[in-house]
Image: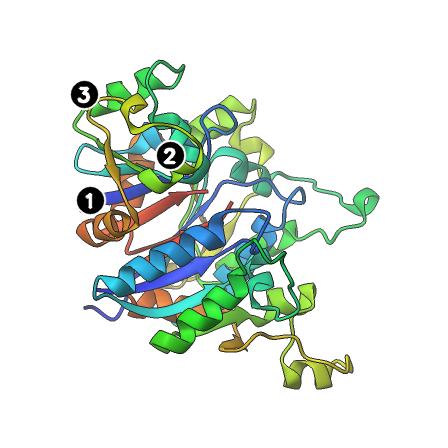
């Protein structure tokens, strides 16, 4: 079983990303959407936790439309985090066995 | 693949209903099936026809109604959550003596069992909220 | 597809400040009639839903904390509390109400429905769920 985790809250406002990262497993994917896209950026106090999880085999994705809306360019995203569109979001949900939304 | 969608927030304060809409639209465009869209908590506020957003803003309710019209979607508003928040169809309105219904086109009011059934029937349940 | 699915409710919000805890409980109670496997998880601020001695007289809202103790009667008896979340908030299991059920396979003996879990066990619960309901 593998899970798609979605996080829609900024790590600077809520602990959703933190709790998510404490349970995410190597075969799963974390997709950052809405205000959660802030967690996907380089040089933040959250960046290291993403890189650590990546080192354990967790895959990361971020919703490009939400980055664009917030004026955050894709080149500021941490290396290895893939930028997807809504169709990519749908595909990720289909490719995993279940979906956990960290609201 | 068969998706079920749960929406927990209203149309403007949170992005949840917008994200759910974009997800649903993309799923349909990519050949997936939407078993049901279930509106819960303040999400029931997506189902009132009395919202009049400014002309240069999107109308989330109208977007859902149109998408439902086009793809024959099942848009279900939770009755318990809706009663608390004043979303009513004609039957509900008559029963509570309110004089007018405000449920938007293509939305229907039903029980929480519809959410559980969606979880059972769909391959994936997607929850959008705060 | 098997007839029975595993429904896992992830509760992460405190009661009263927002409506999520109350309306989540309503889903659990309705869902219990569908004879699916049901697990409830209380994590992060969700652990505050189960504190003992809630008194809402002063805020004028309905105290729904007693409803949790009825869950056993609805055959909802797999209730998991995240240990780390309790610890982070200076709480222990003694601060929470005790939820029990009567085990029909064991002469209706009263047993605890609650289990303390660590993050690894939480990861497993999420991983093995068919349907995840998040509140």
Q: Earlier in the sequence, mark 3 or mark 1?
A: 1
- From the viewer's perspective, tell me whether residue A16 is left or right of residue B60: left
Q: Earlier in the sequence, mark 1 or mark 2?
A: 1
Discs 1, 2: same chain: yes
Residue A2 got which mark? Answer: 1
Q: Chain of mark 2?
A: A
- Mark 3, Cα crowd under 10 Å, few <14 / some 14-19 / many 20+, is few
The image's colouring method is rainbow
Residue B33 image point, x, y percent: 27, 69
Q: Is residue C58 above or below residue C130?
A: above
Q: Nearer the viewer, mark 3 or mark 1?
A: 3
Tell me the residue at 52%/56% (across/down).
B58
Q: Secondary structure at mark 1?
A: loop
**Which residue carries the number 2 mark?**
A67
Q: CA distance from mark 1 to mark 2?
A: 26 Å
B51 or B96: which is nearer to us? B51
Q: Residue at x 47, y 65 (%)?
A: B63
């Amino acid at each position: 079983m593998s899970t798609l985790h979605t996080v829609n809250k900024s790590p600077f406002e809520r602990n959703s990303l933190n709790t998510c990262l404490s349970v995410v497993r190597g075969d799963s994917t974390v997709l950052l959407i809405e205000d959660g896209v802030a967690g996907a950026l380089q040089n933040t106090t959250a960046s290291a936790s993403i890189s650590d999880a990546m080192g354990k085999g967790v895959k990361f994705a971020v919703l490009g439309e939400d980055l664009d809306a917030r004026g955050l360019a894709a080149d500021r995203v941490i290396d290895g985090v893939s930028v997807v569109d809504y169709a990519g979001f749908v595909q990720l949900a289909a490719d995993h066995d279940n979906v956990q939304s960290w609201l | 693949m068969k998706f079920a969608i749960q929406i927990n927030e209203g149309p403007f304060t949170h992005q949840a209903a917008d994200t759910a809409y974009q997800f649903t639209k993309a799923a349909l465009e990519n050949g997936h099936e939407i078993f049901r869209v279930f509106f819960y908590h303040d999400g029931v506020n997506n189902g009132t026809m009395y919202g009049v957003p400014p002309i240069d803003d999107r109308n989330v309710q109208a977007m859902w109604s149109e998408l439902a019209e086009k793809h024959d979607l099942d848009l279900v508003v939770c009755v318990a959550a809706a009663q608390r928040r004043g979303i009513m169809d004609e039957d509900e309105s008559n029963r509570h003596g309110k004089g007018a219904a405000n449920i938007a086109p293509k939305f229907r009011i039903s029980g929480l069992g519809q959410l559980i059934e969606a979880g059972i029937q769909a391959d994936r349940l997607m929850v959008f909220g705060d | 597809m098997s007839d029975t699915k595993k429904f896992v409710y992830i509760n992460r919000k405190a009661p009263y400040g927002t409506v999520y805890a109350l309306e989540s409980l309503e889903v659990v109670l309705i869902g219990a009639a569908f004879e699916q496997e049901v697990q409830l998880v209380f994590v992060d601020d969700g652990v505050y839903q189960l504190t003992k001695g809630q008194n809402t007289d002063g805020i004028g809202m309905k105290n729904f904390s007693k409803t949790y103790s009825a869950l056993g009667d609805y055959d909802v008896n797999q209730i998991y509390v995240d240990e780390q979340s309790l610890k982070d908030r200076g709480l222990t299991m003694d601060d929470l109400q005790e939820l029990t059920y009567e085990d029909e396979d064991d002469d209706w003996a009263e047993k605890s429905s609650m289990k303390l879990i660590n993050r690894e066990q939480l990861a497993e619960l999420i991983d093995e769920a068919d349907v995840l309901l998040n509140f």
